[in-house]
Amino acid sequence: MNIIKTDIEGLLILEPKVFGDCRGYFFESWNKARYEEAGISCEFVQDNESKSSFGVLRGLHWQAMPYTQAKLVRVISGSVLDVAVDIRKGSPTYGKHVAIELSEENKRQFFIPMGFAHGFAVLSKEAVFAYKCDAPYSPQSERGMRFDDPALGIDWRVNPEHWNLSAKDQVNPFFKDIEPLDVQE
């Protein structure tokens, strides 16, 4: 597995070894010992999967303390632009983001530790997105912020006329109005 560090501490891009032949391919999408060697020592407790069509934009979401989550995300089919925004209180990269294309072709995974808002935009006709979480979904601690906040400067690579958003994501607060996560609590 190839591990790529990003410009933001803790965010990792993982490129698994893919073994392919005329029959198809095989790769390990999770191996606790190998991922621990890469610095990912989460105990994942929930797996999620979503299917979305072109232009669907989900995010930016997170869960408040004490239910904040680390995630290991990947795309099974199609492609997405995946984005993580640092919302850790006191972080030197607070408000900065990393955006990476995840696709069925590149088989990349993105590790997002606690303290980040997360979202993705579907770039292909449709996409199946899968992710592991180290804490279960907690509706009362669910939070969000505007995906299109100019202060964040995220290029979602989808023309705004094609954005397909939930009603909730259309009215989330701006970055300046969110409460930073104190992941040291």
Image (spheres, rainbow, N blue to C red):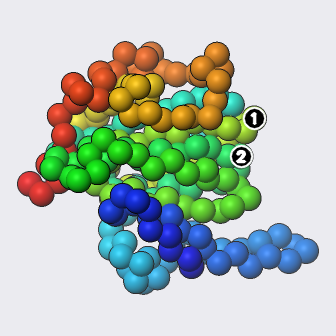
Position of residue 164 in the picture relative to residue 141 (left or right): right
Sequence-earlier tag: 1 or 2? 2
Residue at numbered disc 2: 78
The image position of residue 147, as x and y in percent, is 43, 29
- Mark yes or no: residue 48 visible: no
Q: Does 163 appear above or below 46?
A: above
Residues 66 and 111: in front is 111
What residue is at 40 percent from the left and 59 percent from the top? 7
Residue 125 image label? 1
The image position of residue 165, as x and y in percent, is 52, 22
Please identify the quarter of the rendering in which residue 104 is found: bottom right
What residue is at 60 percent from the left and 62 percent from the top? 108
**What residue type is disc 2 on?**
Gly
Under circle 1, the secondary element is loop
Q: Tags 1 and 2 in contact by the CB under 8 Å rule?
A: yes
Please identify the quarter of the rendering in which residue 137 is found: top left
**Callout 1 crowding tier (Cα within 10 Å): few <14, some 14–19, many ≥20:** few
Residues 154 and 82: in front is 154
What residue is at 65 percent from the left and 24 percent from the top? 159
Position of residue 146 in the picture relative to residue 154 (left or right): left
Q: Does 127 appear above or below 110?
A: above
The image position of residue 85, as x and y in percent, is 37, 44
Position of residue 182 in the picture relative to residue 97 (left or right): left
- Mark yes or no: residue 90 visible: yes
What residue is at 83 percent from the left and 70 percent from the top? 24
Residues 161 and 65: in front is 161
Q: CA distance from mark 1 to mark 2?
A: 7 Å
**Callout 2 crowding tier (Cα within 10 Å): few <14, some 14–19, many ≥20:** many
Q: Does 139 appear above or below 37?
A: above
Under circle 2, the secondary element is loop
**What residue type is disc 1 on?**
Lys
The image position of residue 65, as x and y in percent, is 17, 45
